[in-house]
Amino acid sequence: MLDLVSKLKAFNQQRVVPDEAGINSRVLLVDSLNNYLRNFAASPAMNEDGEHVGGVTGFLKSIGQVIRQFHSTRVICVFDGAGGSQRRRRLFEGYKSNRRPMEHLNRTYNFKDKDEEKEALKWQLHLLIDLLDHLPVNVFSLDNIEADDAIAYLAELTQQRGGTVTILSTDRDFLQLVNENCQVYNPIKKKIYDISAVVEEYGIHPNNFLLFRMVEGDKSDNIPGVKGVGQATLLKLFPALRESKQLTIGDL
């Protein structure tokens, strides 16, 4: 592994850095923990010592593929900061209290027990961050801030400076950020969500997606919605959610 780090250092020193105006023209924002955990669970890849490295190899392959697909000029890998969920737990005590243990999608590699799996999860995450430090990407993490909040801020900042944004994540909460200059790429569905794709799949314009999520709630984060009002009922009652005009709770 040290040999790999040395090669990455040498590559990084040789690469040509584009001018500052160009480097921020097509920014890829990676929801990094989302991407890492998904690959850790799905990939059975092992190194020469028989150790599971699926989280690392899967992560690097996935962002490499997306960089080539979208010709990204800058990559920012965003992680949750220490204590990132505490602010929201102060607002709602039950926030994320229902999170279940990870389920493996590919069981070719089996850990002997939960402790071994937990140790591998931690070890690979540290290894991944070390490797990213030697690649031409930025790693961003801010204490007390969750990754999704940081990504939303960076997406807005990039657009204010004239750039376009692609967000790499399976989290549909990011669909509220979609506009003419910001899209979301779901690596599981291999689907690009622009404005028309969001409206086509959900029947809701990105400008109203946050309002929709407020009414629907978020089971994955243990946030209840309005009882008895699901997506179909909401769209039947308020078809204007398909339109670009941003509605408010008062409008509903």
Image (cartoon, rainbow, N blue to C red):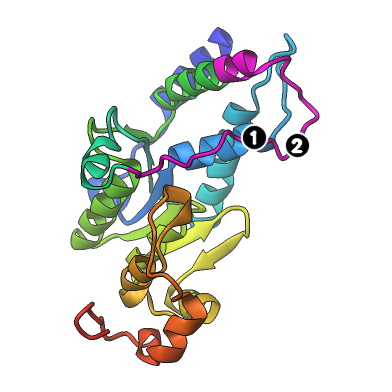
Considering only vertical position in the picture, is 199 above or below 58? below
**Is residue 114 highlighted in magenta?**
yes
Q: As rendered, which of 93 and 113 lies closer to the eye?
A: 93
| Image x and y of residue 209, in percent | 36, 71
Residue underneath mark 1: 41
Q: How many marks?
A: 2
| Res. 54 image quadrant | top right
Query: Is residue 223 on the magenta stretch?
Result: no
State the residue in front, 163 or 171.
171
Packing grade of label 1 (10 A; few <14, some 14-19, many >=20) is: some
* Crowd rating for badge 2 (residues with CA inside 10 Å; few <14, some 14–19, many 20+): few
Q: Which residues are magenta?
A: 94-120
- Amino acid beneath label 1: Ala
How far apart in space, not on screen, are marks 1 and 2 (Cα)? 7 Å
Is the N terminus in the top left, top right, bottom left or bottom right quadrant? Answer: top right
Does 168 appear above or below 225? above
Quadrant (top left, top right, bottom left, bottom right) of the C terminus: bottom left
Residue 171 screen position, x and y as percent: 47, 54
Q: In x, y percent, where is residue 211?
A: 31, 72
Q: Residue at x 47, y 42 (%)?
A: 98
Contact between labelled residues 2 and 1, with CB atoms less than 8 Å apart: yes
In the rendered image, the vertical position of residue 200 relative to residue 162, given as above or below: below
> In the displayed structure, does residue 50 sit left or right of residue 210?
right
- Amino acid identity at mark 2: Asn
Question: Residue lying furthest right in this view?
Answer: 108
SS at badge 2: loop
Q: Which mark is residue 59?
A: none
Helix, strand or loop at disc 1?
helix
List x then y, in percent, for residue 122. 50, 19
Tell me if residue 169 comes above or below residue 48 in the rendering.
Answer: below
Q: Which quadrant of the view contains residue 38?
A: top right
Where is mark 2, residue-wise?
Answer: 106
